[in-house]
Amino acid sequence: METGLTREKIVGMYRKMLEIRSFEERVFELYAQNLVPGTIHLYGGEEAVAVGVCSNLRKDDYITSTHRGHGHCIAKGAEPKRVMAEILGKQTGYCKGKGGSMHIADFSVGMLGATAVVGAGIPIAMGAGLSIKLRGTDQVVACFFGDGASNQGTFHEAINMAAVWKLPVIFVCENNLYAMGTRQSIVVLIGNIADRAVAYGIPGIAVDGNDVLAVHEATREAVERARKGEGPTLIECKTYRHKGHSRIDPAKYRPKEEVEEWLRKDPIRRFKEKLLQKNVLMEAEIQQVKKEILTEIEEAVKFATESPYPAPEGALEDVYT
Amino acid sequence: MRKITYKEALREALREEMRRDPTVFLLGEDIGKYWGGAFKVTKGLAEEFGDERVRDTPISESAIIGAAVGAAITGMRPVAEIMFGDLTALAMDQIANQAAKIHYMFGGQVKVPLVIRTPFGAGVNIAAHHSQSLEAWFMHVPGLYVAAPSTPYDAKGLLKTAIRGNNPVFFCEHKLLYPIEGEVPEEEYAIPFGVADVKRDGSDVTVVATLYMVHKALDAAEELEAEGVSVEVVDPRTLTPLDKQAITDSVKKTGRLVVVSEDCKTAGVSAEIAAIVAEEAIDYLDAPIKRVAEPDTPVPFSPPLEQYVIPNEKTIIKAVKEIV
Ligand SMILES: Cc1ncc(C[n+]2csc(CCOP(=O)(O)OP(=O)(O)O)c2C)c(N)n1
Ligand SMILES: [Mg+2]
């Protein structure tokens, strides 16, 4: 394939996407078995975004995440078993059970945390970009947020600041067409959220968010600019969540034809077909990858379900250092 | 009398006021025909009143309240919904600096008849960003009224008063109250602000409780009754104005006070109520005042952690026993 990427890199991307998908499928099953407290927002269908972006990042680069954040964690290199343990509220989870599905962070891999307050991560990512600039390193920050979040003041304020200060931030809008039951067209008049970049004097680009290579390429350019000190980029990835917004939302507000159309555009299937067609991967290898991932995710589930809950008094710890 | 849920009672109040007064309208995220509100309070209202009067908004809390303020000072009566109480933080300037102060700062020229409805409370494992009880933030702002109904009857009657009034009202709901059933008459009624309700008569100790904690206090009172302790449960119903008279009257009768509130203890609802009794009725107290509240921590996610911080019957009973 004419991507400039090594075969190893491409296979790694496919693998990560599959890992996220299998992880989310298991979370859904565990939820149905009443093993997941609270609520869940699954990433299934949007894997090409997290993987296309994070495959450009180094371990010391940063990301910020959202309520729909499991995929971001795994794409940035967090261990699935500790993500799973956090989702189940266990002591061995990344946040000792204090955060849960909507609030996972793994600072050891530059995952600066998910926030359940829509749009709240955008200025924080910008601040991490400011820190990079002040410390004089060549790190970058990728900031994930939804189409809904782009209507918060924080989006506009933070992008403007990042623009004028030329901060190394890649603003990644995961446009899955809906914010809960609200279609984007009800709350935004323009077709592309990327066009908002014009207002802040930075590059804005809309890409097919279900094409991992397209996301990768757009991000590669943005990261290159950011590392050179040329400032931020807004990348809008058009994608779709396969399931409802949360928990058991049946998503009746989405037309059936629309759902079917997007299921046909499944990012993992599309990538696989391309890889097979271009002889990058053989069917047997794909089966092998799948097997390995299923084993790994089963181990994560076992680790999480067998881990202890935190001791109740732990609630009083960590308020201050 | 017929029984309906707290959620249905709120919906009835909204529906009746919208039918009565064409200037009443609703705005908020996902309150319209596609979702009917995250907790379904507004379900069916967009179908009856249309998208213009039941407006789905972008995710823009600050502008939602700003829109309500602008509309309120120019002839409308907006009722804004903020999906979770925690998210009122995003609209704090519009609530605390604008809505609350406009009447005073502009020398009484204009009224700000708006209502902000939002659910507080922990107990459903959705962690630090969706579980807080922040009533006290709003009690601290002169110019705002703060309602906090604990039953379907109170919810309907207070929401009607809130909508008809000419001041900004911060209307606290609670996630765990929405499914609770209670008697609500079919005929018209409204409950005035500043009038507490004695939810249970008793003679040994006064328990002042708010929102969901009223139910925990009633459960505790039931158990204590079996042990020979008679508990009076007083529900202020509105935190601003606060019915100091009803609280001090009860304390004068029992000589003992426990205040139960789900918010963090420091500078919280319980602190204010305890201070008022200390100031105005200390001579009637036969024992120190006790407060049962959440410890000063964010609300944690994992069930054992979360249950540890939320006040419950046991912690209330323990506090009562310490002073009787
Ligand atoms: C500030 C804020 N407002 C509202 C909510 C409730 N809420 C949670 S997710 C969500 C929709 C977010 O939509 P989008 O940003 O498009 O992300 P998606 O869920 O589609 O990934 C809403 C309204 C919230 N958590 N925070
Ligand atoms: Mg969305």
Image (cartoon, rainbow, N blue to C red):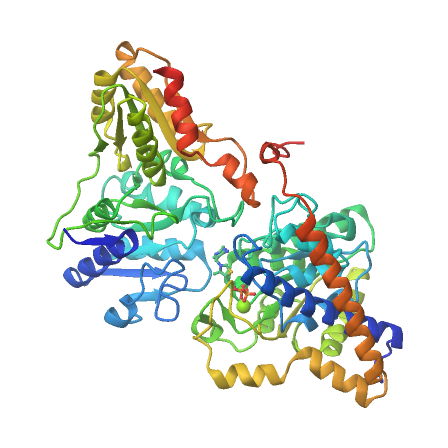
The tally of labels here is 0
**Quadrant in which the C terminus of chain B is drawn:** top left
Q: Taking A93 as reference, is B125 left or right?
A: left
Q: Position of residue A224 (x, y in %)?
A: 80, 66
View extreme (left): residue: B187
Q: Out of B170 and A282, give the one closest to the viewer.
A: A282
Q: What x and y, as percent, mark residue B53?
A: 28, 66
Q: Position of residue B233 (x, y in %)?
A: 27, 30
Q: Residue furthest bottom?
A: A277
Q: Is residue A115 left or right of residue B17?
A: right
Q: Quadrant of residue A260?
A: bottom right
| Residue A230 seen anywhere in this rendered image of the structure | no
- Residue positioned 10% across, 53% down in the render: B187
Q: Nearer the viewer, residue A110 or A39?
A: A39
Vertical comparison of B178 with A2: above or below: above
Between A128 and B50, the residue placed more toward the observer is B50
Q: Residue furthest front?
A: B226
Residue B263 falls in which quadrant of the image?
A: top left
Place of residue A145 in the rendered image (x, y in percent of width and height, measured from the top left): 60, 62
- In the shown orientation, is residue B186 left or right of residue A265? left
Q: Residue at x 75, y 82 (%)?
A: A272
Residue at the (31%, 16%) spot, across then down: B279
Res A32 seen here: yes
**Front one among A241 and B6:** B6
Q: Is residue B2 left or right of residue B293?
A: left
When the figure is inspected, residue A63 is found, relative to residue A135, above or below; the finding is below
